Image (tube, rainbow, N blue to C red):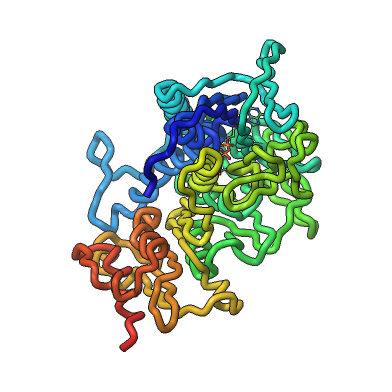
Amino acid sequence: MRGAVAVSTDRVVIVGGGPGGYEAAHVAAQLGARVTVVDRDGVGGSAVLTDCVPSKTLIATAEVMSDLSGAAELGVVFQDDEGDAATSIRVDLARVNQRVKQLAADQSEDIARRLAKDGVDVVEAVGRLDGPGRVVARAADGSEQVIEGDAVLVATGAAPRTLPTAQPDGERILTWEQVYDLTEVPTELVVVGSGVTGAEFASAYLNLGIPVTLVSSRDRVLPGEDADAAAVLEDVLRRRGMTVLSKSRMESVTRHGDTVRVALTDGRTVEASHCILALGSVPNTAGMGLEEAGVILKDSGFVNVDRVSRTSARGVYAAGDCTGVLMLASVAAMQGRIAMWHFLGDTVHPLDLKKVSSNVFTAPEIATVGWSQEAVDAGEMQAEVVMLPLSGNPRAKMQGVRDGFVKLLCRPGTGIVVGGVVVGPRASELIHPVSVAVAESLTADQLAQAFTVYPSMSGSLAEAARRLHRF
Ligand SMILES: Cc1cc2nc3c(=O)[nH]c(=O)nc-3n(C[C@H](O)[C@H](O)[C@H](O)COP(=O)(O)OP(=O)(O)OC[C@H]3O[C@@H](n4cnc5c(N)ncnc54)[C@H](O)[C@@H]3O)c2cc1C
């Protein structure tokens, strides 16, 4: 419980206005500090302007398409104006993308308004450190101002990784930041990279009706996620017509007129009208005077931080994607808040990654929290595991949902819930009770005791918890 914190007279300078930066700014302002945010591209950061918000807005349209594709089974019939059966539904990609960009811009403005209300100064400029407590902000017109701070928070995020042999051209070879400039629907799309970002875009565009080939260097999609969940997703994607090329490493991506050619290291090639590169991210830390200010970077360029977001330089904190700790907006925001609670002397709980819930916004969605089955199988954690397919859930049957499951992990003996996975529609919403259980060290019995609505998908979570009961 936070209580009587003396109002601060400190000055805080934040470089980067994404969730790591703006959430920290709110906390610091609330605690009385004078706060300046230096941002070069617009507050909200990549999270709001190019990554998280735009992709989830695009996926909202893809979800409607996915729901419609299952509508016939539920007795919904589409007719054209003459009363004949309509044979196809079409997506107007230009309209979708316009909505995406408008929503992102509006969200950025909302954040700017909230910051202004909290008395936070926002400076539109590129920031760099000139020693631990000094930030030089260079505006677009070349003018510079020096902003001194008792603490500096670096929250500059990350950018899409590209390769010399796979250079985006912004027209047909695209990073995830460039897809919203497409005005015409790709006739065929190749997505290179089957991590979370690659899988989300591949699933979304497939549901928008575009033939998709997913190039995956590993033997399955989503190598970092629960193996059962990834298997369900891959099966669904293949059934819906996606070509998934496993164990296929991209060597180069080149443009030939209106065609894009993806060459694989084994000599095969894939051709399509467009290609999205989802090759991971590089931190925005180069040329910022960080090492000169005593901030130790990893070889990969990410900032080294501890669990309260301190860097190796006194008074310099770092949060979000530039630290590479866990590249999620929610984690960036928490790292930023933690930095300010720590610096300004409020109660602070160090970051605990085992309590982070996350979601892959594919169809079906994959939501996860806490310890993984992989860690259990590797002997890093002892846990009992129960997995229940959603196909047996009454609500799932009513909705025509066949793919997906819930999985719960609890400690033997105490029965404390230590992790869970939900695969299914709206898994991102369903994971919350498991997340609460993990955060509060509830037992499977306690989770099972709470009423669930009948019929509901969450009934499967309670059922899984009941199956973990030991007499
Ligand atoms: C396609 C995609 C989808 C995603 N979806 C989700 C999701 O659904 N849920 C989720 O939790 N996470 C999601 N993420 C991850 C999420 O977007 C990031 O974790 C989040 O943006 C990190 O926030 P941040 O504050 O560290 O950095 P950013 O949001 O990148 O913000 C950093 C800001 O700093 C600015 N900046 C950089 N250098 C300087 C400088 N020198 N001076 C001034 N300003 C500078 C940048 O322009 C930017 O505005 C997604 C990522 C991608 C790529």
Q: Nearer the viewer, residue 458 or 319?
A: 319
The vertical placement of 279 against 467, above or below, is: above
Residue 176 rendering spot, x and y as whole percentages: 60, 39
Residue at 52 percent of width and 20 percent of height: 121
Residue extending farthest left: 454
Horizontal and vertical percent for residue 405?
A: 39, 68
Q: As rendered, which of 149 and 182 lies closer to the eye?
A: 149
Q: Please indicate whether residue 89 sits to the left or right of residue 252 in the image.
A: left
Q: Quadrant of ligand 1?
A: top right
Q: Is residue 467 visible?
A: yes
Residue at (67, 63) in percent of width and height: 218
Tally the marks: 0
Task: Let me know if residue 97 appears in the view.
Answer: no
Q: Which quadrant of the figure contains the C terminus?
A: bottom left
* Residue at x-position 53% and y-position 53%: 351
Q: Is residue 87 above or below residue 267?
A: above
Residue 186 sits in quarter: top right
